[in-house]
Image: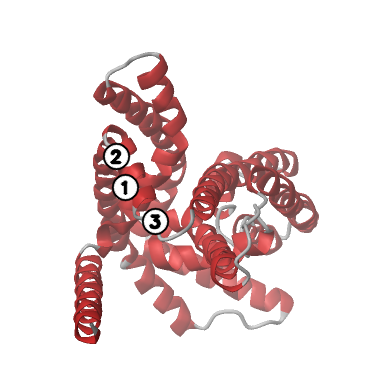
Amino acid sequence: MNQAIDKNRLRQVFLIVLILFLGVVLFYQLYSFFPALLGALTLYILLRKPYKILTEKRKWKKGLAALLLMFVSLIAILFPVYLLVQMLSGKVAYALQHSGDLVISLQQLATEIEQRYSVSLLSDENINKLGNWLAGLLPQILGATFNTVSTTFFVYFILYFLFTNGQAFEKLLLDYSPFQDESTGLLEKEVHTMVVANAVGIPIVAFSQGVVGLIGYWIIGVPEPFFWFGVTCIAGMIPVIGAAMAYVPLILIFLAGGQYGQAIAMAVFGFGVIGTVDNVMRFTLLRRIGDVHPLNTVFGVIAGLSLFGFIGLIFGPLLISLLLLLFRIYVSEFVKKQPLRS
């Protein structure tokens, strides 16, 4: 009897080690596709309800409903991205093509500020390093563009099969879940809530900051306000620093030009209004959508961007929430052995 138990235990350990080994090998080889998988899961969770309406109530064919929702989501995602790229690409391309002129302008600006305020900003060595960095930035942008296009292709490639085989996929996860039914249901609810809160909430917060900033840029007299609107929208999605990456350079530009009144107005409006919009909406909108604590969002986004790239804006906070939820599930099922409450 003991020998049978030992053999079964040995087979079990061997199978677990084999599964983990193959899983690690496959994850290591396919890690570059992981952001595409997370992006496909995000869209699947967001579009799952409309897909069910089309296929179950409207009796559409699965493939046709999947293609329609994929097309609509692609337009909804690419159209604002296209507008932002159009606003920003000309400036970035010009700066890269004229990096030498930009270095000279920066040197003149630094010299003027140093003479006017008796401070030391940038040495010639650092300015030259900046020029070399700008010259080498174009290949990086081209590479990032190619990666974005390829990732988008695989996102929708995976998403099609998630739609057409979604029910079987969900049933498989439920059948092989190691948790009790109540814990599995709560885990599913938490994932859905967090994905919706971050996929919808973070862009809304950033866009709101951009709109508020655009109004202020017009009033203050910022040159090319729509360009800075795009910068504010993008910067608003970055944790900690956020939209300050837009209005702090504007303050410095006004100071360098001797426009002290506009510099003061920009500082007051930036830190007092644009920054307040970010704080208020993160405490209200995100908490209303998914009861997301701001610290969860900040540290989750920092970790997510490092792990998964841009899609980490959504799945970084989700990882922290899942960690806390899994701890609660463990305590409920193995320590206190009490029903888990949401």
What type is the residue that disc 1 sits on? Leu
Q: Quadrant of residue 16?
A: bottom left
Determine whether label 1 and label 2 are within 8 Å by CB.
yes
Query: On the rendered structure, is 176 left or right of 81?
Result: left
Residue 68 x/y as whole percent? 33, 23
The residues bearing labels 3 and 2 have C-alpha atoms spaced at a distance of 14 Å
Q: Residues within 10 Å of mark 2 (few under 14, many from 20)?
A: few
In the image: residue 202, left or right of residue 90: right
Please name the residue that numbered disc 3 is placed on.
177
Q: Secondary structure at mark 2?
A: helix
Instruction: Provide the residue designation for mark 1.
Output: 172
Question: What residue lies at 39% left-to-right and 36% top-to-bottom?
Answer: 78
- Measuring 54% from the left and 71% from the top, which residue is drawn there? 334
- The residue under label 2 is 168
Real-space Cα distance between discs 1 and 2? Answer: 6 Å
Q: How many C-alpha atoms fall within 10 Å of the one at disc 3: few (<14), some, or many (≥20)?
A: few
| Residue 315: mark | none
Give the x, y percent position of residue 38. Answer: 37, 52
**As rendered, which of 146 and 125 lies closer to the eye?**
146
- Mark 1 crowd level (few <14, some 14–19, many ≥20, 10 Å Cα): few
Asked if the residues shown at circle 3 and circle 2 are in contact, with their CB atoms under 8 angstroms apart, the answer is: no
Q: Which type of secondary structure does the marked residue at label 3 adopt?
A: loop
Depicted 105 relative to depicted 92: above or below = below
- The amino acid at mark 2 is Ala
Q: Which image quarter: residue 244?
A: bottom right
Determine the residue positioned at 45% across, 46% down: 88
- The type of residue carrying mark 3 is Ser
Looking at this view, is 139 or 190 the one in front? 190
Residue toward you, 322 or 272? 322
Q: Earlier in the sequence, mark 3 or mark 2?
A: 2
- Sequence-first disc among 1 and 3: 1
